[in-house]
């Protein structure tokens, strides 16, 4: 099999060839990071990953090679390469096991922007949904000093109520420790996770929010309640 280093060289060259210099200028403002940016848009990265994977990692037997490739890509800490790797990983979701979470626990140390964090969380949500004991690990991450671990919990929680999944109870438990988190990147993910839960079960989410609203910033509460019925929204936001 082609070596990891060869694949990294191929991926980097492919991404470099698709640099959008105008986008790169904007990306440096929209994606705060001290790490390298190549200036490739997410839809382009996704398309490139799909085409590259069909040629190089098309079999489910390639899953372990994909994991090793992500190990190397995350260590390089280049935003586009990490996203490319995550999109490769998503194609193997049918063979995910709970062992994947151990790798994510390793990769998360190199995450330091919302884009990579949220895409990785989206990939992880299916393995969490199938392995309920992983909710305990996520619960522990809510107390992490690393803001990206806390953001990852909530980004994963948001995905756990997408595409036919319904984990409202578990998501609200995960949100419990983070309702008063003052980190902006966590706050944004918090109201996102609660809003997705409210689409599945508005009454339960409303009752939960009523019990937490005194701990939450008003702006976070308002956005969390955005998809609730108008009467419930008004009651939550009443002085």
Image (spheres, helix red, strand yellow):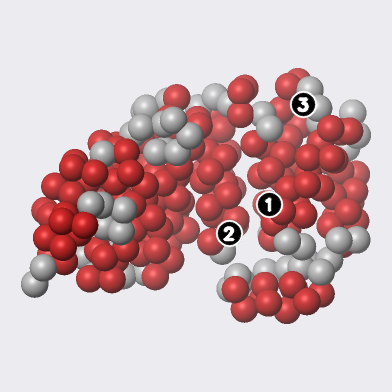
Label 2: state its secondary structure.
helix
Q: In this view, does 155 lie to the left or right of 142?
A: right
Q: Distance between the residues labelled 3 and 1?
A: 18 Å
Residue 110 position by quadrant? bottom right
Label number found at residue 62? 3
Which disc number belongs to residue 115?
Answer: 2
CB atoms of marks 3 and 1 within 8 Å: no
Question: Tag 3: Cα neighbours inside 10 Å, few (<14), some, or many (≥20)?
Answer: some
Q: Is residue 59 above or below residue 69?
A: above
Residue occupied by mark 1: 83
Q: How crowded is mark 1: few (under 14 residues within 10 Å), some or many (20 or more)?
A: many
Q: Where residue 174 appears, x then y in whole percent?
A: 30, 45
Classify the position of the N terminus by image quarter. top right
Tell me the mark number nearer the camera, choosing from 3 and 1: 1
In the image, 20: left or right of 234? right
Residue 22 on image: x %, y %: 78, 76
Mark 1 touches mark 2? (CB < 8 Å): yes
Is residue 111 or residue 235 the one in the foreground?
235
**Is 182 on the left-hand or right-hand side of 93?**
left
Q: What residue is rendered at 54% in x and 24% in y?
A: 97
Mark 3 and mark 1 lie on one chain; the one further toward the N terminus is 3
Q: Quadrant of residue 12?
A: bottom right
Drawn side of residue 1 relative to residue 32, left or right: right
C-alpha gap between disc 1 and disc 2:
8 Å
The answer to whether the residues at label 2 and label 3 have Cβ atoms under 8 Å apart is no
Q: What residue sits 53% from the left and 43% below the top?
A: 122
Counting residues from the start of the chain, the first of labels 2 and 3 encountered is 3
Looking at the image, is 34 positioned above or below residue 66?
A: below
């Amino acid at each position: 099999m082609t070596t990891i280093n060869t694949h990294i060289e191929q991926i980097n060259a492919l991404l470099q060839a698709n640099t959008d210099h105008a986008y790169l200028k904007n990306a440096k403002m929209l994606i705060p990071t001290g790490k390298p940016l190549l200036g490739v848009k997410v839809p382009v990265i996704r398309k490139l990953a799909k085409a590259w994977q069909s040629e190089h990692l098309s079999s489910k037997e390639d899953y372990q090679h994909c994991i090793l490739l992500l190990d190397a890509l995350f260590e390089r800490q280049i935003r586009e390469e990490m996203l490319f790797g995550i999109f490769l990983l998503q194609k193997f979701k049918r063979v995910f096991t709970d062992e994947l979470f151990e790798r994510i626990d390793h990769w998360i140390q190199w995450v330091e922007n919302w884009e990579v964090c949220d895409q990785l969380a989206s990939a992880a949500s299916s393995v969490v949904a199938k392995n309920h004991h992983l909710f305990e690990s996520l619960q522990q991450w809510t107390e992490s000093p690393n803001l990206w671990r806390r953001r990852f919990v909530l980004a994963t929680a948001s995905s756990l109520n997408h595409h036919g999944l319904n984990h409202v109870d578990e998501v609200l438990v995960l949100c419990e420790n983070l309702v008063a988190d003052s980190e902006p990147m966590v706050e944004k993910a918090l109201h996102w996770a609660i809003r997705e839960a409210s689409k599945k079960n508005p009454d339960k989410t409303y009752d939960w929010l009523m019990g937490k609203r005194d701990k939450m910033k008003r702006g976070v509460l308002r956005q969390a309640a955005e998809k609730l019925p108008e009467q419930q929204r008004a009651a939550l936001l009443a002085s």
